Amino acid sequence: MMTRLRTNPLLWLVPPSIAMAVGTTTTLMTILEYNLTSAISDTNITLSIGGIAIGIIGLVIGYYFQNKPSKTMHRLYAKFNKKDEGKKYRYLNRISSNTLLITKKLVRLENLIDKYIDDPPPKDWQIVRYSADRSRKKIEELEKKIVLDFTQIIDLVENSCLAGKLGANSLYYSWYLFDETLRINPECDKELLRELRKGIRGQIAELDDALCSLKEEEEEEEEEEKRI
């Protein structure tokens, strides 16, 4: 967040106030002494009026220059804030797209595994392994992109829970599930296959929750941009 750097707003009041005080004091003294020295009094009255005028002019000028930088800083702050918000929206959109891709690959893997849970496993389990291997490599790339993108806007994100949902450890679990698929022999261990399917379903739910949070963050961003 940008912090306004301003000097003490009371400082600009000092010179004009002194001028007005001197002018006012001189006027009062001149009135009291008028009967004694009329010529000097006329001169003092002129000087005192001038002092008061200078004080008033100083106050006006001081107020103008005190507020002009404030307005300028406000415009600059709004400009940079709008730039940051636009950057945040672009990154959020890309993170959402990549998270959705991971979710779709997990759903596909779950559908493939479902065929092997109850019925005798087909003889083409190697197709599942091949699909899992390709997806695992792609997911590793997507996870790196998500983590890198999120670090660019982490200070701008309102929902603090997103850091955990999109953290490296949470995303890594998706990669682990595909890697685990490559190690399983469904003919030998049905229970392990069921545990794998359970893990996949749990991860899909976690990513769906992250997508909902991302959507809420994007909607809040759109509302903020409209207000700006």
Image (cartoon, rainbow, N blue to C red):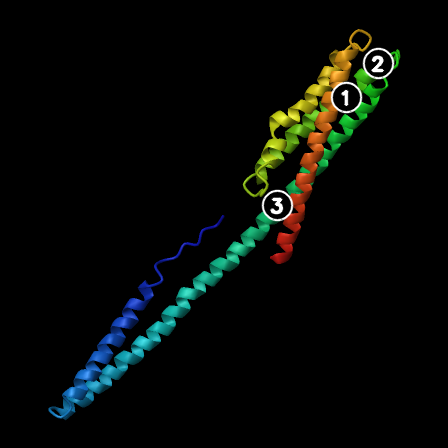
Residue 26 falls in which quadrant of the image? Answer: bottom left
Q: Amino acid at mark 3?
A: Lys
| Rendered view: 117 above or below 212 | above
Whether the residues at callouts 3 and 1 have beta carbons within 8 Å, the answer is no
In the rendered image, which quarter is residue 22 located in?
bottom left
Give the residue at x 71% y 26%. 202
Q: Is residue 94 visible?
A: no
Q: Is 208 on the left-hand or right-hand side of 74? A: right
Q: Residue 14 placed where, x, y %? A: 28, 67
Q: Which residue is mark 1?
A: 134
Image spot of residue 107 (x, y percent): 79, 27
How far apart, in angstroms, are the residues tagged by discs 1 and 2?
Answer: 15 Å
Sequence-first tag of 3 and 2: 3
Instruction: Name the front one of labels 3 and 2.
Output: 2
Q: Secondary structure at mark 3?
A: helix
Measuring from the top left, give residue 75's x and y in whole percent.
52, 59
Count of numbered tags: 3
For the point 60% across and 30% down, which residue is it?
167
The CA span between labels 3 and 2 is 44 Å
Q: Secondary structure at mark 1?
A: helix
Q: Tell me which label, 1 or 2, sits earlier in the chain.
A: 2
SS at circle 2 = helix
**Three-letter amino acid code at the position of disc 1:** Arg
The residue under label 3 is: 87
Identity of the amino acid at label 2?
Trp
